[in-house]
Image: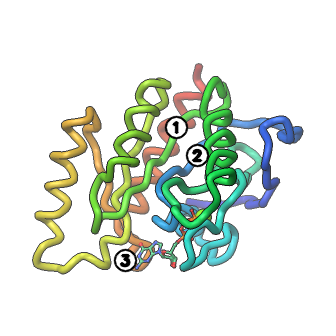
Amino acid sequence: MKFESLKFTASVKNIADIRFNRLPEIAFAGRSNVGKSSLINCLVNQKKLARTSSTPGKTRELNFYCVNDKYYLVDLPGYGYAAVSQQERASWKKLIESYLTKNPFLKAVIQIIDSRQGITKLDEEMINWLAHLGLPTLLIATKTDKLPRSKANHIIKTIETDAAKIGVSDVVPFSIITQQGKNQIWQAILEVLNRAEKN
Ligand code: GTP
Ligand code: MG
């Protein structure tokens, strides 16, 4: 991938605060600390464009990163982080819901799960909800570098079987360390954007 420009555009706590020029958007969703921000950095070959942390709950707003002045990669706050107040969790939920619902700019969601944990109950709820909203979703099983090598294939097969049961036909194994899956993810993103451009 070639980048003519790469910009952090805005951090948004309320949908009403989105006052900048809208472009096609690809959002990154998943449990807190799963590696959403890290995946974005890996895709754009940057270490610190999106802020990452080993402590869950780092991304608390919608963060818009503009690529080539053509589209946005949107980093979402993670779900399922227990150590925040009920009130804060409710406000994240509201923010994510209002962003994902009836958003004509949103072209696809990259849904990320931890390959060591598989599809958790909350992940399943999220995947079902994205399907209900009719949003094209790409499922990524990340942190594959942490899988025991002898078991990696079996673990990915199990995730694929579980994904198929909830209507997801593709799983992309990924790791920021080995960069496994990176090209496949770009291919999927570019396909979605091309299709959106034609419509
Ligand atoms: P929140 O913003 O809190 O929701 O988290 P996030 O999903 O954006 O996760 P983030 O990208 O901040 O990564 C969380 C931790 O996981 C960091 O310590 C990353 O270095 C680590 N991490 C992310 N992806 C990988 C991976 O593929 N392999 C390994 N080994 N570590 C990873
Ligand atoms: Mg983050």
As drawn, is 142 to the left or to the right of 150?
right
Q: Find disc 1 in the rendering and name its residue.
A: 108
As drawn, is 116 to the left or to the right of 184?
left
Name the kind of residue labelled 1 in the image.
Ala
Q: Find disc 2 in the rendering and name its residue.
A: 27
Q: Position of residue 171 (x, y in %)?
A: 29, 50
Q: Position of residue 114 (x, y in %)?
A: 36, 63
* Residue at 34% over, 59% down: 141
Q: Quick check: is the Cβ at mark 2 less than 8 Å away from ligand 2?
A: no
Q: CA distance from mark 3 to mark 2?
A: 23 Å
SS of the residue under disc 2: strand
Name the kind of residue labelled 2 in the image.
Ala
Asked if labels 1 and 2 touch by Cβ distance under 8 angstroms, the answer is: yes
SS of the residue under disc 3: loop
Q: Earlier in the sequence, mark 3 or mark 2?
A: 2
Name the kind of residue labelled 3 in the image.
Thr
Q: Nearer the viewer, residue 69 or 58?
A: 58
Judged by depth in the image, the label closer to the viewer, 3 or 2, is 2
* Residue at 60% over, 66% down: 57
Q: Find disc 3 in the rendering and name its residue.
A: 178
